Image (cartoon, helix red, strand yellow):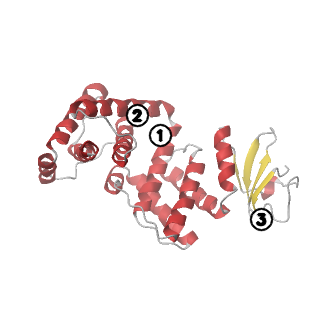
């Protein structure tokens, strides 16, 4: 194989035997080499053959602008996630997660911290993905000598959840349909039009995406929020609670899934926020 492009000392672009472009990674793979130099299979530690041309172009663009350390950490996290979850993640995660790691390290080094409103929900409903997130935070802290907050585990977990969704296109289509059904109920019951550029709408749709995935993968959870908390949220947001009950009716009638009190609690809060906006 011959080098077509050098990203850094450890990562290059080349072609496989079928003439297909691949990204190859190996310690010192491009050291004292140039475009056109030969490399052997024995020198390559990992290859990336993204099937989507546009995704491959984004991957190359990213690799040209960052250190290979970010890709190394991303590899560790993805390998850990696939072993823990016992599933294959969508190849796009190599781009999205590597880019996210780079930006997360940049933010923390520049004193920018972003808090996640979904911390409690992700920790409860996606415990394994959250474990991946915590593993990722430790790996990033060790590699880049930073101190990322627990919220970062949530952002990593959401990338892993997304990568599982995208790998299963039929489920992804069902999820989008359910989100449309639920937002239609909210729009009609609360008599509002959504501001789709608002952070409240983004958080609602994000919540619905992960809720819908639980429905279609039959991932049930036990109630943890007590009756007193539910009563408090019902009194504080009566219209949103009423709307959440209408959503629960729809989900049960159309999708044969009974929303439990915890899910209704979180849904009420998100509806309240988006309708107040």
Q: How many marks?
A: 3
Which mark, residue 175? 2
Residue 174 as seen in the image, left or right of residue 200: right
Q: Quarter holding the C terminus?
A: top left
- Taking the spot 87% from the left edge, 54% from the top edge, the residue there is 38
Which is more toward the observer, 113 or 177?
Answer: 113
Q: Which residue was labeled with disc 1?
A: 165
Q: Position of residue 200 (x, y in %)?
A: 33, 47
Is residue 118 shown to the viewer in this render?
A: yes
Q: Residues within 10 Å of mark 2 (few under 14, many from 20)?
A: many
Q: Which residue was labeled with disc 3?
A: 28
The CA distance from mark 1 to mark 3 is: 35 Å
Q: Position of residue 4 (x, y in %)?
A: 82, 50
- Taking the spot 53% from the left edge, 38% from the top edge, the residue there is 167
Q: Position of residue 25 (x, y in %)?
A: 72, 56
Q: Are marks 1 and 3 in contact (CB under 8 Å)?
A: no
Q: Position of residue 107 (x, y in %)?
A: 50, 65
The CA distance from mark 3 to mark 2 is: 44 Å
- Taking the spot 51% from the left edge, 70% from the top edge, the residue there is 110
State which tag comes first along the sequence, 1 or 2: 1
State which tag comes first along the sequence, 1 or 3: 3
Residue 235 as seen in the image, left or right of residue 172: left
Q: Under tag 3, what secondary structure?
A: loop
The CA distance from mark 1 to mark 2 is: 9 Å
Q: Is residue 7 above or below residue 259?
A: below
Q: Under tag 2, what secondary structure?
A: helix
Tell me where residue 57 sits by quadrant: top right
Q: Under tag 1, what secondary structure?
A: helix
Q: Are marks 1 and 2 in contact (CB under 8 Å)?
A: yes
């Amino acid at each position: 194989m011959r080098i077509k492009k050098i990203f850094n000392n450890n990562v290059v672009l080349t072609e496989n035997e079928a003439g297909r472009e691949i990204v190859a990674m190996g310690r010192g793979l491009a050291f004292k080499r140039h475009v056109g130099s030969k490399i052997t299979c024995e020198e390559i530690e990992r290859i990336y053959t993204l099937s989507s041309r546009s995704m491959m172009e984004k991957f190359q663009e990213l690799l040209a602008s960052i250190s290979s350390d970010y890709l190394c950490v991303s590899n560790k996290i993805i390998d850990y996630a696939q072993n823990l979850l016992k599933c294959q993640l969508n190849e796009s995660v190599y781009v999205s997660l590597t880019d996210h790691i780079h930006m997360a390290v940049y933010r923390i080094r520049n004193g920018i911290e972003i808090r996640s409103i979904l911390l409690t929900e992700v920790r409860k409903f996606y415990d394994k993905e959250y474990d991946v997130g915590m593993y990722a935070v430790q790996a990033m802290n060790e590699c880049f000598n930073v101190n990322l907050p627990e919220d970062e585990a949530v952002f990593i977990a959401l990338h892993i959840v997304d990568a599982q969704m995208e790998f299963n296109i039929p489920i992804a289509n069902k999820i989008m349909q359910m989100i449309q059904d639920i937002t239609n109920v909210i729009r009609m019951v609360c008599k509002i039009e959504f501001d789709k550029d608002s952070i409240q709408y983004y958080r609602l749709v994000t919540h619905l995406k992960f809720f819908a995935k639980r429905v279609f993968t039959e991932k049930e959870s036990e109630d943890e929020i007590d009756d007193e908390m539910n009563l408090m949220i019902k009194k504080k947001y009566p219209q949103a609670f009423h709307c959440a009950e209408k959503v629960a009716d729809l989900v049960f009638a159309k999708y044969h899934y009974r929303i439990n009190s915890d899910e209704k609690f979180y849904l009420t809060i998100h509806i309240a926020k988006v309708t107040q906006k």
